[in-house]
Image (cartoon, rainbow, N blue to C red):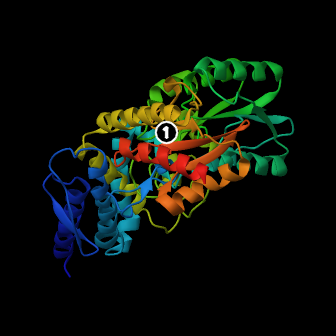
Amino acid sequence: MSGAKRSAIFSVAFLSLQQLLHLSCSAAFVHNNETVRVNNTAANFGHEMLAEFYLADGFTNLNHGSFGATPRSVIAAQHTILTTQAEARPDDWFRKDYKTLLSGLRARMAQYINANKDDVVFVENASSGINAILRAIKYSVGDYILILDCAYGMVKNTLDYLKLTFDVEIIVVELPTKFDSDRSVEEHLSRALEAHAGKRIRFACFSHIVSVPAVVLPVERLAQISKANGVDRVIVDGAHALGHIDVNMRTLEDAGVDFWMGNGHKWLYSPKGSAVLWVPQARQNEIVPTVVSSEWRPDTFLNQFEYTGTRDYTPFVAMNAAMDFRERVGGSEAITTYMHDLAAFATSHLVQVWGTESIAPASMQAAMANVRLPVTDPEKASTLRDLLYEDYDIYIVVYKRGDSWWTRLSAQIYVDKSDFVRLGEAVLALLKE
């Protein structure tokens, strides 16, 4: 085949890919023998949006926060990238075309989070980002790392590994069972840092939005307090933040944040295995990907993370399709407003129906509600999640904090008020049995 003919064929395939990544509003395409249609107007949020996802019929997913749900159009775009690009011409894909597409995506994502393009790379998930940072540093005896008691389990496990391997000491800041304001978190951090004055704290790590309890932390202030008290570096674990709340890396950097990562598969609607890692230029030589590949070179931050061996990179590239989906259904502002308002309704309704309370004020919660369950019996509380799933096909998160049992509930664009009304009734019915 002549070079000109081959180039022409490739151009057609590439054009099709570009069209798919930025779908026209009236498009329709086939995926797994199923026609996936794209509406030309913003769909009504609520149950009408279920048609956009692969969630099982009758299943009420109130736990979007754990694993997300990827829209049909995004999965179809990912599949097309795989079949028309990655598998069709593997050498072109791995050696140049994937990297070209990724460069464009970095620019788009950088604009979305108000960052410099060259400070943004992609990793599989927040866990990969945390490990790339914490496990690349050379530690010495007498080094400390600080976290809050509500840090995600992966972070705690990574620190346990560092303690066993390098004798790093861990400072855990204990917070109240319930949160009454941002100020309370800031005061507990300040007191902990004062109590450990003079110690060499290499990192402080804070969740942007905590997993459980799902509260939004004042990470800018926490970073400022940490730096003012001599902490070397501040990490913000934004696993739940991307697509959930506004993220502004310039504001975070000005506050003293040194590293930030956020999952795409949760609230941004991208495929599993897609996340963003932000590192400012001054810190880029301090970290190493969790996989050192054949293309690794010192002082080449973008290249180090761009290629980490032969693997499926389509989840990264399909983040473009996720951004397109968000625009098609109304845009980020409309999405987050709907989710936040729905979570606020869930909180007020269930507090009233169950006669309980919320774990934090509305100012500290976004699209995930945290309501105390009307149960004190540990056995009933520990089985409630599974009973709801088996009897009502509703999935929720149940967790214990302090002496009480709580539920974390995710509001999403495919959920509506009736789902939380039904949940309230179902919990009361099960607890009467």
Residue matched to label 1: 368
Q: Which residue appears farthest toward the bottom when viewing the image?
A: 1
Q: Which residue appears farthest toward the front when viewing the image?
A: 432
Q: Which amino acid does label 1 sit on?
A: Met
Q: Is residue 216 above or below residue 33?
A: above
Along the line of sight, the residue nearer the viewer: 96 or 194? 194
Q: Is mark 1 on a helix, strand or loop?
A: strand
Q: In this view, does 359 lie above or below 327?
A: above
The residue lying at 40 percent from left, 39 percent from top is 117
The x, y position of residue 132, in whole percent, is 62, 49
Within 10 Å of disc 1 (Cα), the crowding (few <14, some 14-19, many 20+) is many
What is the quadrant of residue 361 in the picture? top right
Along the line of sight, the residue nearer the viewer: 383 or 312? 383
Q: In this view, does 189 lie above or below 29?
A: above
Q: In this view, does 237 lie to the left or right of 231?
A: left
The x, y position of residue 107, in whole percent, is 35, 42
